[in-house]
Image (cartoon, coloured by chain):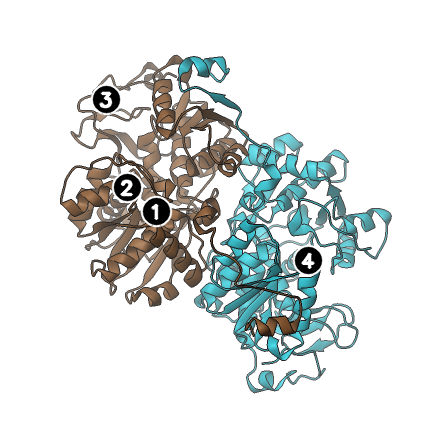
Chain colours: A brown, B cyan
Amino acid sequence: MAVQTVASNTDTAASPTLAASPVDLGPAAALSCRECGHRVPLGPVFACEECFGPLEIAYDFSTYDTEELRARIEAGPANIWRYAPLLPVPADVADKPNINPGWTKLVKADNLARELGVTGGLYVKDDSGNPTHSFKDRVVAQAIEAARAFGFTTLSCSSTGNLAGAVGAAAARAGFRSCVFIPHDLEQGKVVMAAVYGGELVGIEGNYDDVNRFCSELIGDPAGEGWGFVNVNLRPYYAEGSKTLAYEVCEQLGWRLPDQIVVPIASGSQLTKIDKGLQELIRLGLVEDKPYKIFGAQAEGCSPVSTAYKAGHDVVRPQKPDTIAKSLAIGNPADGPYVLDIARRTGGAVEDVTDEQVVEAIKLLARTEGIFAETAGGVTVGVTKKLIEDGVLDPSLTTVVLNTGDGLKTLDAVAGTGLSATIRPNLDSFREAGLA
Amino acid sequence: MAVQTVASNTDTAASPTLAASPVDLGPAAALSCRECGHRVPLGPVFACEECFGPLEIAYDFSTYDTEELRARIEAGPANIWRYAPLLPVPADVADKPNINPGWTKLVKADNLARELGVTGGLYVKDDSGNPTHSFKDRVVAQAIEAARAFGFTTLSCSSTGNLAGAVGAAAARAGFRSCVFIPHDLEQGKVVMAAVYGGELVGIEGNYDDVNRFCSELIGDPAGEGWGFVNVNLRPYYAEGSKTLAYEVCEQLGWRLPDQIVVPIASGSQLTKIDKGLQELIRLGLVEDKPYKIFGAQAEGCSPVSTAYKAGHDVVRPQKPDTIAKSLAIGNPADGPYVLDIARRTGGAVEDVTDEQVVEAIKLLARTEGIFAETAGGVTVGVTKKLIEDGVLDPSLTTVVLNTGDGLKTLDAVAGTGLSATIRPNLDSFREAGLA
């Protein structure tokens, strides 16, 4: 089917294909504009025809009984599909071929808590445990199900890292062709990680902005017919995957909201969906309603949201990124204003740390908890430390810090780490080195 | 406490420290020699004083009721500690700080099955989902608990890769000092992965054999007092971690034995413990007793066991390893004779594949199932393919293939993988490349 823009605000589907075969995406009832509330039927569209605002999934949860739902979730599989009743996926999603991410460890980080002076319980939600070792598996898994429902046969995205691997792997498992676009001069290691799954991996002569522009062009062209771009025309579905981080944290805390949660900001989508997930759990009665604070974390070299937050602005001024935290390096974050709103509404904050602090934080987390985080995890841990030192984050409250990726993918950041000693293979040399 | 050799065959402990505080390692009752059956109390010893055979854990499972045990396991945590009643660990192990590996995905590999012509159900047990992305987390987690019980304060090992990371991470979380010995000229990437956890990482001027010899010297010296070498003086405990692979496979199959299982061979310990684990499940009544076949997989460049198997020998002649499957490159595998025995007894086989076939198999698994395996996973998948083609492995039976590590750690093996096309950022260039 062709990619389309929304052409109707009635309850009939937006294209003949959709009208002919109604889409079964479980509790997903429609798409709704975050800005003006305009509703359209489920389809591969992402911007409101009325106001160009972002479209989100609107659900029908009205039939759920709280305790039945809780029991159903707890009896579900050890992956995100345990939350299928709350996601835009068919009820039998767990039986379909997919990468099945999620249900990653919520690590009680007692050693790190001691170092940071947190007394109320500190937890690291470690998403490096996902199949391709980043949280992107969660969102891509959703996009796959939407792509299936809409009859797409090719899965695509623009990427410089984690997303390329997640799309390649999920497409391979789920039986889609994949075609991932990257800047042609990416480091060889990243190219290998993206290419190994056997899909098309196309280098674009240009930078990441050129890659993105090209993808937008392709979506509007007949050549892109049948293509699902996970973070463009499938974005409303894709983005919902981040809600599962909120669900898992609460269930793993014993169906309890955390008091404080520290979330990295790239486009800002993840933070807004975590807030959405927490609100849903409250509305559904799965957790007790109580205040929680959401904190956003950026690298100083790409800190458009924290800059706006500190200046008291409602709008976010774009920046040209220059940071080692490349997976967060979005200079013009689409959901920036929503992030500002959520941080202020919940009593949180948005903060940033230098690249040096990112590296220190990666090492701190590894040394205290044995978790080797990607630079994005260094950003959240570093920001947590800074917020505690500044008296912004309350160390007496239950705090959850997200690690969204794996240190093996950003080895360069800690390349300076090395041998503590070199000795000859005998005991005298060992003793001389003072290691006994 | 000092590292010791076994000095007693009575029921009293082998050292004053052990006598003073009896060791609580749950159902572990004693150490028993695999060769002569000689029993000694639990302690940090690994070789029989009577015959120099390897010591193994002897359990007391006599009090278990099958259905109570099954229910207890199923209600346990989503990690190896669900099997605490069957492991040499205290009953409250899940509450202690540890890296908590296991309960990794058993992936129903339908796409790979189609390519290989397997009709009886093909599964990949994907241990890249462990905390440091290899099965070594399972064995190190056991060693940590033994180290705790014996009062050790430093955790150590010799390593060239996966084990260094697993020890570094687990020691950090569990509050042990760690001191890992590696050849001083290891690739920088591997050094970084091992060093990031902040323990001592000592380069030895020499090759891996020199490192091992030095470690043996250190164990017998006062300088090594209080040191637990996970794969030397803690080896009987450490090795038991591999049993959990067998437990998980059976539970994930619905408490059912697989018909065939393909296991990589380095020292051979993993294969022998998987057999031990399956036998225990049968004896405990947790699975129905029926025949199963265990197949061993090696790389041609380090194939001492498959060479012996094919020649019909009972003993294994050492080889000098030369293969890209470095995590399996043990030229003189300690458990080689036991592996031969198990393969023959169960009706399995031992086979090897070339480095080229290893790379092909890594790509095959990635392309079909979205799983990016370490070279060791390429070995098992490649051997599975070969055994099917040769009519040795029966494609109509339920077959499980182990992937014990992560492709991100052996990127060099697939370094040739790259872009399928490079284009200019416009639709004409896209069409010219034939990608539409």
Q: Are marks 1 and 3 on the same chain?
A: yes
Q: CA distance from mark 3 to mark 4?
A: 71 Å
Q: Are marks 3 and 4 on the same chain?
A: no
Label ID, residue A273: 2
Which amino acid type corresponds to the residue marked 1 in the rendered image? Leu
Q: Residues within 10 Å of mark 2 (few under 14, many from 20)?
A: many
Compared to residue A98, the image places residue B350 above or below, namely below
* Residue contact between numbered discs 2 and 1, judged by CB atoms under 8 Å: yes
Label ID, residue A11: 3
Q: Are marks 2 and 1 on the same chain?
A: yes
Q: CA distance from mark 3 to mark 2?
A: 26 Å
Percent x, y for residue B237? 61, 67
Q: Are marks 4 and 2 on the same chain?
A: no
Disc 4 vs disc 1: which is toward the camera?
Answer: 4
Q: CA distance from mark 2 to mark 1?
A: 9 Å
Among numbered discs 2 and 1, the one appearing first in the sequence: 1
Q: Are marks 3 and 2 on the same chain?
A: yes
Which chain letter goes with mark 2? A
Q: Nearer the viewer, residue A18 or A415?
A: A415
Which amino acid type corresponds to the residue marked 3 in the rendered image? Asp
Percent x, y for residue A157? 40, 29
Name the residue located 37 percent from the left edge and 16 percent from the top edge.
A2
The answer to whether any part of residue B393 appears in the image is yes
Q: Nearer the viewer, residue B158 or A135?
A: B158
Compared to residue B332, the image places residue A321 above or below, namely above
Which chain letter goes with mark 3? A
| Residue labelled with disc 4 | B207
Which amino acid type corresponds to the residue marked 2 in the rendered image? Lys
Disc 1 vs disc 3: which is toward the camera?
Answer: 1
| Residue labelled with disc 1 | A245
